Amino acid sequence: MRSERTWPITVLLAAASLPLLVMYAYLILDTFTDSAPGAVFPNRFTLEHWRFLTERQGSRASIWQATLNTFIFATSTTALVLFISSTAGYALSRLAMPFRRLFLGGVLILHAFPTITLIIAIFLILQMLGLYNTLTGVILVKASLELPFGIWIMKGFYDTVPWEIEMSGIQDGAGRFQVWRELVLPMVYPGILALGIFSFLSGWSEFILPQVLAPDASVQTLSVYMASLIFDDQNFNFNLFKSVGLFYMIPVIILYLVFQKYLMNIYGGGTKG
Amino acid sequence: MDIRIENFTKRFDKTTVIEDLSLTVRDGEMMALLGPSGCGKSTTLFAICGVYTFDEGRLFFGERDVTGLASQKRNVGVVFQSFALYPHLTVAQNIGFPLKVRGESRAEIDRQVRSAAEMVRVPELLDRRPGQLSGGQQQRVALARALIRRPDVLLMDEPLANLDAKLRLDMRTEIRRLQQETGITAILVTHDQVEAMSMCDRIAIMREGRILQIAAPRDMYDRPDDTFVAGFLGNPPINFVETQVVDGHCRTQRDTVRVPLPERLIGLPAGAKLTLGVRPEFVQPSHHTRFTGRITFIESQGREDLFDLELEDGTVLRSIQSVGARVGVGDAVEWGISPHDVLFFDDAGQRL
Amino acid sequence: MIIRPLRTALLAGTALVMATAAHAQDYTITVWAGGSNDNDIYRITAIEMAADILEREMEILGEEISITVDGRYNFASWDDFKQSVTLAAEAGTGPNIVVTSHGDIAPWAQAGIIRPIEDYIDLDSWPVTDIYPNLMEISSFEGVQWGLPQDAESRPFFFWIPHLEAIGYTAEQIEALPAAVEAGEYTLYDVLEDAAAIQEAGLVEPGLGFYPRVSNGPDYWQFYLSFGGEIQDPETGHLVLDTEAMTGFYQFFADAVAAGVTRQAHIGTPWDQWYAEVASGIAGLWHGGTWHYARYTGREGLEDFFGNVQFTLIPAGAEGVGRSNTITHPLVYLVTSTGDEDTAFIAAELIKIASEPRINSLHAIKSAHLAIAESQSEIDLYRGDRWAREATERLLPHASAMPNHVRFGEYWDLMWGGLESVWSGQKSAEEAVADLEVAVVNALGDDIIVR
Amino acid sequence: MTRQAWLGFGFLAPATLFVVAFFLAPVVMTGFFAFTNMSTATGITGGTYRITEGVISRLAGSEDVPAPLIEALGQQQSVVDPTGLAALAQGDFDAAFVAELEEELGGRTFASQRELEGAIRDLDNRPRRVRDIKAAAELFERSVLNVDFATQADFAEAIQAYAGPVPDTAMTALARAAYTGWSMTTDNFSRLFNSPELGTVAVNTVFYIFATLTLFNTGFALVLAITTFYLPSRQASFFRTVWLLPRISPPVLYVLLWKWLAWDTGFLNAVLEPLGVAGRNWMFDSETSAWTFVILINGFVGASMGMIILSSAIRAIPQPILYASAVDGAGRLQQIRHIILPQLRWPLLFITSYQTLSLLTSFEYILLSTDGGPGSTTEVWALAAYHTALRNYAGNLQYGYGAAMALVLVVFGIAMSFVYLRLFNFKALVGRPRIEQ
């Protein structure tokens, strides 16, 4: 069946993928060369587009401040999502309790909710809590909006753990908490890893929330930093944008190369664990 | 320690799966809960170990009422069908887990794990992980883990179902050996009558949430209470022949088989319907009560041959005989039944 | 004069400051400037300079204060800037001083986001007394002086001289163009004609003959004025929709697209592309702002501006219709409600000092904006700049401003939406105005008069 | 309640807290805001009571408030009266100044505070700092024009103190006119349904979702899944990897790359110009080209999810079935038509409903690329709500009206979610927990 010739398919797919290949290839090329935007062939090697690493752009914070902010944002969000989803997911998957159906239905509905439309109200809540324009505030919001998805995914992973493992743990004298902590949790590590990578990437890329809820230079994330650079019509320089962009994407590329398998799983919508 | 279940009833939502079940397992006895899938045997086991709660009824371990007691406090060892070994722990950690939970010292855990491993004969596997073990080895580890904290009761849920045939034989004896060595009261849940008969002191046979009969294996085989029990036990299965009482005999409609009624049944009115149960080993060429038929099928089982014999009216009788009969498919034969060994069941399937 | 709700608290506060006057006081004044790029750095630097002066003045008075100015510009767009300021002000974490459009005064005053500057400075002192009265008027609302103008500008019409010459204009005609426009002799429909001629002559690509601003802006109200429109009723202060003028205005852009001199998808063209094109003769006629001069002659490298570009008022709509005009859209310095009274007094004082002619001229010349005060024309830096001089003379006397009205922004958005729908060909001018009428009445109710 | 129920509630507590605070509360508040006229001008947190020139002009001709009262309220007045002088003496002012002020200005009335300040400045012993002059002058302010009052009671009290007794109806009318905050209204919805622009936006939204969904999220995803299935595994994984790139790239960067491709000085022009195609900015050139790019940008991201789900669905088809069909002589196309496609019905349905919702509510990519332009040709509903409520050129953020637009999406989202519950087979998901104690 697979022995038929496949080159027409390869050609077809390569043609369809061409825009992507070109865009990402030149993303890397243009940061080290001085070619004008759109030049097909790069001219000379240069590192001048990387000067943003040491020079501040206008009144913006330094790139390192933005990088640190983004890192704090992404890791804190991930930590919160992982911690909360791994307990809540377990409760929904395994624990007999009143209103379980209600909770589960709620998670499912929120899972597919138009979150970004709530941003006005979210702003007001942050303001009441005094968390507007702080990283803490936008971390809490991002984590909360990711939670239904996270809980849903974790529930899926818990569902695949055999009941007998838990029954066995109980017969061995362990309490439910201990069973969860020592027996079940280790069995869903792949899920935690996948969700963790997903949350990290999602936090790392997030644009609108920090843009609206934490626009100040001192708390700016890389996405906001980069957007303000791009939209500044006085300094239109694709090579600079791409260099910042490539810098911004380094962690993404690393995670992507290392954890491709897990990503495929979770970007499929995580319908199953 | 004996186990006593009194009037146990279990419902899931509105479906009653176990109704008013009572059972006593004697101290040191190994009891089989035998029945087809869905009969409630596993539910009963889970209720005994505390995974399920009792909707009604009580459960005693010895004199102690454990009905409302949490699983963790019941001191029960359970071996699951899938063995339920913890995949991320080593064999030693698996076996030692119950002790670790109890907070025993590391040295003590070590010592006991070693001796338990020796008891189940896997001392060389302690550093492996479950994924690296064969089915039989996993089974042994699961047993060691169940037994290490010296439970009052050992429960086994289809422990052999996941093993291949050869291992199953080995483990049968192994489990029985361990049970007898430790003298622990044990319950074995199985759907396999051979396991139940070969391993257990007594069998409780279940169907649709009720216990039909409790008896020692031999008694149950020889004197099943009804057609279901008779049919469930024995391989090849028992032959059932529909008959009617006609002057001291019971016979099939076209009189292809005619068996004299034993004395205790002489009083039955003519025309009463009886089902005869004849085990294949009691259908032999030499037996007295003769009938004729044609061989339709022969299956050689090595030491024995299995024959299907079709009578004129289409009734098929199965016979198992030592190798040696010189007949072939299509041959007409006249064989016999041993009338003393025939079981009589009434209309409702109860043995008379 | 708006007084804080708790007068006594204010008094107590004053007393407290007096009692502790001997100690050094530290103030951090945050300044956010909207619509500002590196050219506009003096919007912030002026405050820094003022801080230096104020510190010295206070020292002489025997009070030691230290002021740190924390400036922020480089907002991605006006949209982003206003979002940030509004939300930050609601949260009480906004800047102390904002540099923004005067149009924001009305809604922000109602919302309590800003403090009236008249509560914090003496309006009867120099340099406030020296500022053009009309600019002072523009930075007030409902009789209250809310802020001080930061700069002035105006939005002229531009012509690429070589193209005009190529289609037969003589040097004299080009020289006389500003007067012809002012007198209403050269109209917007002449613009279309010349743009078409330039295209036909192959001087510019189709669609680049008339090359308007690429995004929403006050500029577009000029065309409404060109057709005789009025934005606010001087009597009642209500907004005004003059359907006839609005139709003329919409129809003009529809005609421009129909004539092929303006692209149907023009709106949204990136600014950097637009600047490069108009500053190099790739486009024919266009309109922009006085401050564009800095960009054309700076980044875009247009060396001989006056030899290549003629500028005029925005022409009248058509022969006998409307009037030539230009809109000035000054930015203003405003003190926000963020921070305590002390800080507000410092912030207001800084704004006042930054408005002094010398300091303001730095911004005016560096960014090609116009002066806010009469006396600036006597400062060498300003007087020596040909652009500032000519633009001031030719444009400012005819400049009007958009109204300060709480709901003007909503009207503006709807007007813009209507223009976009005509421009992109979704509606005819009449349909769009009819829809606009429904929409403004729907949204603004009694606040707008439809004529 | 059982111990495990307690454990369950404990385990759900953090999630519940977060979701309620930052998710459910915003939903409820959005619903509420939709019925207010909240905007930049009214502020979010509520307003104050203040008589201004604008209020006076709006009240003109009012039936409830008598004309003389309106006129009186419109006056500003500073009176150097004993009360003020007493307050001045109490304050931390120089005694000579206080004495001089009383002597020179005592009993005089000024038409504005500014005039009084001017008069004070002429005194010999006046304070040196502007701020202190203002503090002194303020003590004599006697009118209510432009004064802020935090509550209606304070407002009423001050009015009565200034203008004498005022009837209740007049006071109510005054308070309503003077209030600077927001109020409840259903106008947003009548505006919403009567707005011609939103009609266009709704059509845009439907077109955008339909086109992206059919062309990429399902259509091209299907092509990718099927073609990679037939490719040798190394090639297949290469293409899958490439197509996952758009999804994991930060949107800001990803859209930048498209801009680079489409810009007037971009790659596309560099390639096409030698072929005689006139250069242009492809992202803004025409309605068609703008839509093309909006759909491409979103579609390239969206295709990966479908690709992954459909690929695994195809791999789940038992090999023997495929072998059998090959033995039966089915060509690839027949195999796809008769064996693969029927198996993909449910995954396709899932992708369609899931992506409909995410396309409906996410606007990040459009915001970053065309921002709804050129003109408003690519403006979709969620983006319009964002523009209305939070981001527009004139800076008049209409929170109330924007919330009403958002509410439409929220309602639609909830309705769609119920469709999910069916698709996901909700009952199967809430399987009974098997440990009862």
Image (cartoon, rainbow, N blue to C red):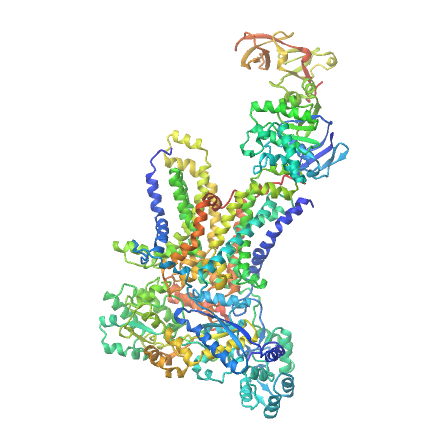
Q: Is residue D406 above or below residue D68?
A: above
Residue at the far bottom: name it: D103
Q: In the image, C225: left or right of B49?
A: left
Q: Residue at 56% across / 35% down in the picture?
A: B129
Q: Is residue C396 visible?
A: yes
Please state, as top left, top right, bottom left or bottom right, where the C terminus of chain D lies in the image. top right
- Residue A78 placed where, x, y %? 53, 51
Which sits in the foreground, C275 or C219?
A: C275
Q: Quadrant of residue B60?
A: top right
Q: Quadrant of residue B230?
A: top right
- Residue A222 placed where, x, y %? 45, 58
Which sits in the foreground, B252 or B271?
A: B252
Residue at the far right: name it: B63
- Residue D286 placed where, x, y %? 35, 59
Which sits in the foreground, C330 or D160?
A: C330
- Residue C411 placed where, x, y %? 46, 69
Q: Is residue D372 visible?
A: no
Q: Is residue C198 above or below residue A194?
A: below
